[in-house]
Amino acid sequence: MGGKNRKGWRFVRAALFTLLSLVLAGGLFYSFHPVVLTAAGRYLAPEGDGKADVVILEGSEVIKERAVRVGVELISSGRAKRLAVVYQDSEERALGLRPDYDLFLIQKINELGLRKDQISVYVVPREHPITLNEAKIVLSKLAKDKTPNAIVLTENFHTRRTYWVYKQVGKALGIEIIPYPHFSRCRIDSWWQKAEGVRIFLGEWIKLLYYVLRGYIPIKSLMVT
């Protein structure tokens, strides 16, 4: 009987220790979760330093004004000389989109303060893998102009994957890449407070892992900036 009692007490102590550890860990996470989750956000949205010849506004089917303004601000602050806007065209165009959308973009960006000779619009097909194909097309065009470096401007937590895709392609072409995120639908220091922020964060994590598993970017992209 004594042996059974000792085993029973050991089990109870182990269970209590485990429960206490979980409560303590939960309490610590609750106390420090803003710091932890903000760091997780910065991991997916790294921001590089330095100047570059051009700001590349990563592609989308419709170019957002806020993203363009961030690019213009980078140029106005002296971090870059010109802006390259990437527009992803597809067979299923957005309703009401002008057939001369690229020329329309140049006109509107010109009105925001850039000279027309500072603006380029690259139209790329929206084909899988989208980010990789985009980087190959855009950087090959910039390489012909002997562009030495570029800031890649991306939205939210898409930054890390885009940066590594552009970095891998740019390395072969002699173009250095600097990442720069901008946030429109959530904030870096409170993204977990909105369902959309959580959805964006988790979605980009999955896409990052997918690109690694498919070999589009190296596994070290998960460990270093």
Image (cartoon, helix red, strand yellow):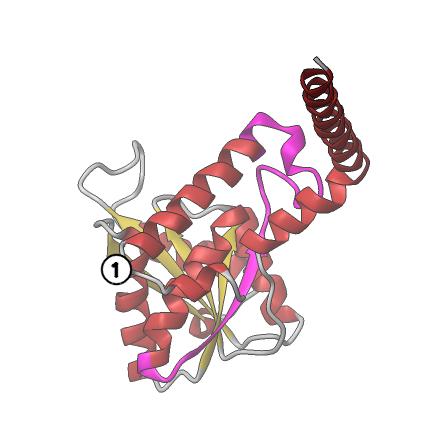
Q: Amino acid at mark 1?
A: Asn
Q: Where residue 130 appears, x then y in whole percent?
A: 28, 52
Q: What stretch of residues is rendered in magenta? A: 172-197
Q: Is residue 87 visible?
A: no
Residue 36 shown in magenta: no
Report which residue position mark 1 lands on: 133
65 lies above or below 31: below
- What's the residue at 59%, 57% (across, down)? 70
* Other-residue count near label 1 (Cα within 10 Å), few / some / many at <14 / 14–19 / ≥20: some
The kind of secondary structure element at disc 1 is: helix
Outermost residue toward the top in this view:
1
User: Quadrant where the C terminus lies?
Assistant: bottom right
Q: Is residue 47 left or right of residue 146?
A: right
138 lies above or below 190: below
- What's the residue at 53%, 58% (across, down)? 111
- What's the residue at 61%, 75% (across, down)? 79
Residue 173 shown in magenta: yes
Q: Where residue 201 appears, x then y in whole percent?
A: 52, 40
Q: Is residue 208 visible?
A: yes
